[in-house]
Amino acid sequence: MRTVGAGAAAVGAAGLLGTAGAQESDDEPAGYLSIIYDDGPTQDYEMFHLHQRYGAAGCTAACPGLINSSEKWLSSGRLLEMADNGWEIMSHTIKHRALGFAPIVEDIEAGDTRIYPDVNIHGRFEGDPIAVLDEQNETQATIAGNGEDDIGPYIELEEGIDTGFTASSSTRVRYTEEFLREILTESQAQLEEYVGEGQVTNMIYPFERDDGLVSELAPEYYVATPTHDGVGLNPTHNPDPYSLGRRYMETDHMTEAEIETFLDTVAEEPDYGILAGHSQYDTLPPERVEFVLQQAQERNIEVVSVQEALEVFGVAAAPERRVGRTSPGENQTPNEQPNETPNEDESMGFFERIIAFFRSLFS
């Protein structure tokens, strides 16, 4: 009976975890891989079901300001379902704002209402507070809009700036520290309103902009901040969670042969692989994701969330998750919320269910 019970427990654990931690093989994994999807589009829900077929966890970096906003984005119900079935929910700011800085490429005179960064990643939202600074001075302004003229991309300000700046490598624009802290705090808190307190521990920088002040602030709020480095291979011994690199697996970034080489390295070397992509893009069709999952499975690579990987590597404990509580809802509408009241089987503990099962055999 102990033998049968152990086998039942193994099968039950596989069903409950819904992650690669419950692979069919009892062997130690050859390596670890995390797959991160950015932005939180509704297509992530399709990837979630694809991952489930392979018993593999995944990560979605979602913007709570977009959740429930339209059918283009995940609903809070689907987000919770994914989290309850082994997926990690990561912060991606509230509305996909770039948190790093952009260099100023044109001199600024006091009183100017238009400033010129090399790329306009901060001017999308009217009313956002920004800081313009160099090595000696810093001043604040409020965004009124953005655009592009004969000089280049520009940010329009509500009022004339009160300090002049010379364009140089040290002259830049970013959000104010107060606003950066608000974004870091609120994006995490808003996501946890959907998936549970303490569940959102890691963040992905929109536009991969992690330069400047935000890189100093993020560790106050998050355990890890993987960012694109074009390599995606990380040490498994004492990794720095704020220097984790990830690589885009989309068809315009990697060939199938490159993916195979990448996974060979994960399996053969003591490397932790992180692949990423945008499921709403044509360059990341389900066939590409399935190829990655198949190739990982063939190499006995365990596909885990970043939280799980960091626990394996002894960096930080993964938060306790209500894994398996919510059943996948193929017919769930985009804005439908899951039932918050668990049924009798869901409220019963796993081992209690095992005991009840064997009692039923002999009753």
Image (tube, helix red, strand yellow):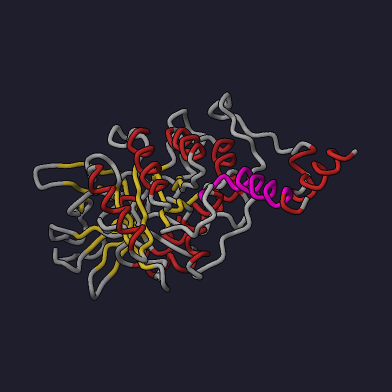
Above or below — where is 269 with respect to 120? Answer: below
x and y, in percent, of residue 270 in the image: 37, 66
x and y, in percent, of residue 72 in the image: 43, 30
Question: In this view, which residue lies farthest toward the left?
Answer: 150
Residue ID at (34%, 58%):
266
Question: In this view, which residue lies farthest toward the right?
Answer: 363
x and y, in percent, of residue 277 in the image: 34, 44
Tally the marks.
0
Closer to the camera, 201 or 297?
A: 297
Above or below — where is 337 with respect to 150? Answer: above
State the image quarter where residue 109 is shown. bottom left
For residue 16: magenta?
yes
Q: Decide if residue 210 is in sight here.
A: yes
Above or below — where is 306 with respect to 194? Answer: below
* Residue 152 located left or right of residue 136: left
Closer to the camera, 93 or 118?
A: 93
Q: Decide if residue 127 is in sight here.
A: no
Instruction: Name the quarter where the C terminus is drawn.
Output: top right
Closer to the camera, 71 or 150?
A: 71
State the image quarter where residue 197 is shown. bottom right
x and y, in percent, of residue 10 in the image: 64, 49
Residue ID at (80%, 48%):
352
State the image quarter where residue 16 is shown. top right
Above or below — where is 154 with respect to 317? Answer: above
Helix, strand or loop for the magenta stretch, by majority: helix
For residue 158: magenta?
no
Q: Bounds of the magenta span?
A: 4-20
